[in-house]
C-alpha cells in the first residue's frame, strides 16, 4: 500500500477510524523482520506513526509530513530502513507540495535518480525519469521567477512630508 494511492474518498473514510485501527494499519504496512518495536526504537516508531496518521487523514502540510516520514524510512529511524517506502513518500511530496518548496526539488532529485538508475526498489524507467526532470525544470523556472520578482520589486515612493509652520 503506497501513500500516494490513497484517494481523497479513502482518506475521508479513514477519518472515522480510531487511533488503534490506524496503528494496526501502520503495523501491517511496516510488517518486517527488523526489531522496530525494540524499546530503544519505540519512540521513533510512534513518531513515524504520527506522520503516517497525518498522511492517512489528509493533513499533509504541503508535503512536509511526507518528507519527515521519507527521511525516517531512508535512514531507518524508528522504522526499518526501506527505500521503496521512502520513495513512496517522495512521490507524495510531488503530489502535495508547492513546486517552489525545497522539499519538492529534493524529492524530484531522489525520484529522478531512482528511476534513472533502477534503484530503491523500482525498475529503471527512463520515461518516468524524464517526466520528473520536466517537473524539476518547471520548479526551477518558478523559483527563478519568484526570486526575480522579489529582486525587482519596487517600493512605493514615499510621499514628501509637508512641513507646517
Image: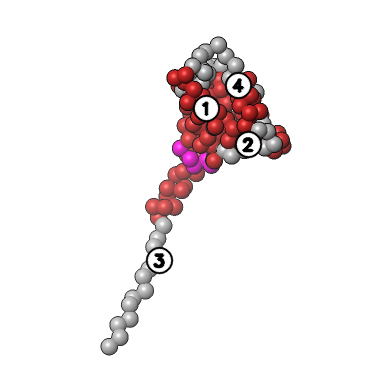
Judging by the rendered image, the residue that carries numbered circle 1 is 46
Answer with mark 2 or mark 4, whichever residue precedes in sequence: 4
Which of discs 2 and 4 lies nearer the camera? The answer is 4
Viewer-side residue, 14 vs 75: 14
Is mark 1 in CB contact (under 8 Å) with mark 2? no
- Location of the C terminus by quadrant is bottom left
Q: Write down the residue under mark 3.
A: 156
Instruction: Find the magenta span and give its range.
Output: 98-102
Label 2 sits on a secondary structure element that is loop
Q: Are marks 3 and 2 in contact (CB under 8 Å)?
A: no
User: SS class of the residue under badge 4?
Assistant: helix
Q: Main SS type for the magenta part? A: loop
Whether pointer 4 and pointer 3 mark residues with C-beta atoms closer than 8 Å, the reply is no
Task: State which tag comes first along the sequence, 4 or 3.
Answer: 4
Query: CA gap, disc 3 to disc 1?
Result: 51 Å
Q: Which residue is mark 2?
A: 57
Could you tell me how far apart the alpha carbons at marks 3 and 2 are, in whole angstroms?
Answer: 44 Å
Using the numbered discs, state the Cα–Cα distance from disc 1 to disc 2 in whole angstroms: 16 Å
Q: Position of residue 2 (x, y in %)?
A: 63, 25
Residue under label 4, please give it: 27
Cα separation, mark 4 vs mark 3, equals: 57 Å
Residue 87 screen position, x and y as percent: 54, 24
Q: Is residue 91 magenta?
A: no
Q: Earlier in the sequence, mark 3 or mark 2?
A: 2
Whether pointer 3 and pointer 1 mark residues with C-beta atoms closer than 8 Å, the reply is: no
Amino acid at each position: 500500500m503506497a501513500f500516494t494511492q490513497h484517494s481523497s474518498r479513502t482518506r475521508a473514510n479513514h477519518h472515522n477510524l480510531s487511533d488503534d485501527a490506524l496503528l494496526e494499519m501502520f503495523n501491517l504496512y511496516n510488517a518486517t523482520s527488523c526489531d522496530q518495536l525494540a524499546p530503544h526504537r519505540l519512540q521513533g516508531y510512534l513518531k513515524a506513526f504520527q506522520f503516517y496518521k497525518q498522511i492517512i487523514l489528509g493533513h499533509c502540510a504541503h508535503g512536509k509530513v511526507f518528507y519527515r516520514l521519507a527521511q525516517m524510512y531512508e535512514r531507518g529511524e524508528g522504522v526499518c530502513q526501506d527505500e521503496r517506502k521512502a520513495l513512496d513518500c517522495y512521490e507524495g511530496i510531488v503530489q502535495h507540495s508547492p513546486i517552489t518548496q525545497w522539499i519538492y526539488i529534493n524529492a524530484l532529485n531522489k525520484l529522478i535518480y531512482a528511476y534513472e538508475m533502477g534503484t530503491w526498489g523500482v525498475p529503471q524507467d527512463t520515461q518516468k525519469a524524464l517526466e520528473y526532470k520536466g517537473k524539476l525544470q518547471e520548479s526551477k523556472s518558478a523559483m527563478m521567477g519568484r526570486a526575480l520578482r522579489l529582486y525587482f520589486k519596487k517600493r512605493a515612493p514615499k510621499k514628501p512630508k509637508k512641513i507646517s509652520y
